[in-house]
Image: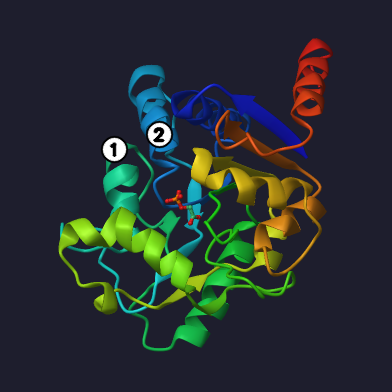
Amino acid sequence: MDVLIRKNYDEISRTAANIIAEQISMNSKCILGLATGSTPIGTYKELIRQHKEENLDFSKVTSFNLDEYLGISIDLDKPYNEDQSYARYMWEELFKHINIKKGNYYVPDGLTEDPLKHCEWYEAQIKKAGGIDIQLLGIGGDGHVGFNEPGTSFNSKTHITALTKQTLDDNYELFYKKSGIPREKMPHFAITIGIGTILDSRHALLIASGKRKADIVAEAIEGPLTSQITSTSLQLHPKVTIVLDEDAASSLKRIKHYKHVENLKKKFSL
Ligand code: PGA
């Protein structure tokens, strides 16, 4: 597990975007796993900048999003503003600004008539595409990655999940409040790829910013493995990069060690 500590949000966004851009440059047909939430917005802005100013080419890239609320969705071609779906978020924050091809980006369908069947279908599409090359992740206040809430099996694949009160509170504050949708009307269930799906990715890239994430980030990286904090499962992943700003890193015990490892790897181009 590589832990990279950066000064601030802009720097983690640049570092994460560079790691993704490098993957795309190495393999123009790569499969990206994408995330939503407030944290990845800067990473997407930087990827858009690289697309516009440095010709970063998404034309052969395929992407799969981590999750979607159940009960809302949109046709990605006709986004409308009131909608709080993650499909809309992806359209607004990334897809409409880059040259990724229609049909090459996937977000779970929150309006599916048969959610269980849709979960199986989504998982099968990831397999069919050859698996995820690089999976971008945020971390929830309850330690979730994707919407894998406390108690989710480390072997889980794409599934339906009930959101915790903490997730509902966090996401209401960040996204729903401004839309005027009452708290009780926001979706309480979601479709999410599983921890097993995330562990199957070839590279997991987790980003976190701010003091409010410091304690849960320390649990995820240095705490014991537990399905009660599903991000601890990343300790089982063979290739993980965690990019933190100084605030999000502030509860870690081994900051010096992580910096030492990063410097050594740079020195020896590892
Ligand atoms: P945030 O959400 O980026 O809005 O903090 C992260 C998450 O819940 O995965």
Q: Is residue 225 left or right of residue 13?
A: right
Q: Mark 2: which amino acid?
A: Gly
**Measuring 47% from the left and 66% from the top, which residue is drawn there?**
166
Q: Taking 84 as reference, is 33 above or below it? A: above
Residue 264 showing in the rendered view:
yes
Residue at 29 percent across and 50 percent down: it is: 91
Disc 2 packing (10 Å; few <14; some 14–19; many ≥20): some
Which one is earlier in the sequence, the residue at label 1 or at label 2? Answer: 2
Q: Tell me the residue that label 2 is attached to.
A: 42
For mark 2, give the secondary structure: helix
User: Is residue 12 toward the left or the right of residue 54 in the image?
Assistant: right
Residue at the image position 59 percent from the left and 63 percent from the top: 126
Of residues 156 and 148, the one nearer the viewer is: 148
Q: Quadrant of the C terminus?
A: top right
x, y (%) of residue 112? 37, 81
Q: Compute the Cα span from label 1 to label 2.
A: 14 Å
Question: Which is in the foreground here, disc 1 or disc 2?
Answer: 2
Find residue 97 and name its label: 1
Q: Residue furthest top?
A: 267
- Label 2 CB sits under 8 Å from any ligand 1 atom: no
Residue type for callout 1: His
Front residue of 68/55: it is 68
Mark 1 touches mark 2? (CB < 8 Å): no
- Give the residue at x 33% y 45%: 95
Q: Which scheme is used to colour this image of the protein?
A: rainbow
With respect to residue 141, does 194 lie above or below? below
Please, is residue 179 above or below residue 138 in the view?
Answer: below
Quarter assignment of residue 23: top right
Residue 158, image x and y in percent? 58, 73
Q: Where is residue 137 shown, x and y percent of the image?
A: 56, 49
